[in-house]
Image (tube, rainbow, N blue to C red):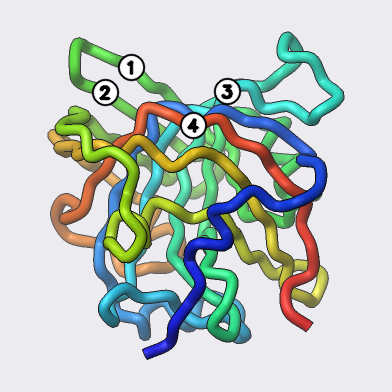
Amino acid sequence: MLEIDRITPTRRPSGRPVGYQRWRSLLFMHWPVPVEALGPLVPSRLSIDTFDDVAYVGLVAFAMQGVRPPWAPERLAFRFLEANVRTYVHLDGRDPAVYFFSLDAQSRIAVEIARHRWSLPYHHAAMRLARRGMTIEYESRRLDRSGARLGVRYEPGEPLGESAPGTLEHFLLERYLLLVEARGRLWRGQVHHRPYPAQRARILRLDDELIGAAGLPQPIGPPPLVHYAAGVDVEIFPLRPAGG
């Protein structure tokens, strides 16, 4: 069995961050999927990362606040909603990372910056988050020809605390690296934040078109693995070439 270092990426890297963000009201939904369904959709140099030989696709919906470079004051920071479809990969047994199939965001400016600076597959969308007591509703519709939608209503539940290394929760949630292919090569990005204050969550309604729009088999039924985190404050570090 391949031993991958999953602890080092959780530590803050040296150097100065290129940005700050606050991630709030994070809903993590995960489904197991066949490795062979994911392999053709990621760069050929990457391997699908698995837990007990099971691969996962994730759908994460949350709010972004305080999005700014280090030189910008808080009053000029962006805030918007975001939802991403992702899986988990590694590069030759190192750099356990997120690979994004798509990212939907409410801010057109943020979409354009992320596309051009980070080469990430962002889409502009109309999005809404509303709270009614303990219930949270999240709605998204892409503002392009596809009009792909996401609608989810859920309730955060029992606190779980920080995920312990070696657990499935740690595998799914504690991801600090991303790998992206751009300009003919692989790039590695890193973020840093405290471990997620994880909670269980219960899905009350889910209507999703984002996973299918990413070219993945559309799951049938609610996700078997659902987690929530109230939020973390995040430092963003620059993209660097990955591997040799």
| Alpha carbon distance from label 3 to label 4 | 10 Å
Position of residue 233 relative to residue 3, above or below, is: above
Q: Is residue 139 visible?
A: no
CB atoms of marks 1 and 2 within 8 Å: yes
**Cα distance between the residues tagged 3 and 1:** 16 Å
Q: Which residue is mark 4?
A: 232
Q: Nearer the viewer, mark 4 or mark 2?
A: 4
Q: Where is residue 49 shown, x and y percent of the image?
A: 43, 75
Residue situated in front as seen by the camera: 97 or 135: 97
Q: Give the class, few, some or many, for how many residues have Cα within 10 Å of label 1's Cα (few <14, many ≥20).
A: few
| Label 3 crowd bin: few (<14), some (14–19), many (20+), radius 10 Å | some
Quarter of image, res 154:
top left
Label 3, label 2: how far apart the Cα atoms are? 17 Å
Q: Is residue 87 above or below residue 131?
A: below
Left of 134 or right of it: where is 162? Answer: right
What residue do we see at 73% from left, 47% from top?
Answer: 237
Question: In the rendered structure, which disc, 3 or 4, sits on the residue that comes first in sequence?
Answer: 3
Q: Residue 4: image x %, image y %?
A: 48, 77
Disc number lying in front (3 or 2) = 3
At x 55%, y 40%, the residue is: 193
Q: Quadrant of the N terminus?
A: bottom left
Q: Nearer the viewer, mark 3 or mark 1?
A: 3
| Residue 3 in picture, x, y percent from top left | 44, 82
Task: Please tell me the numbered disc located at residue 136.
Answer: 2
Q: Label 2 sits on what residue type?
A: Ile
Left or right of 59 on screen, residue 214: right
Q: Which residue is mark 3?
A: 65
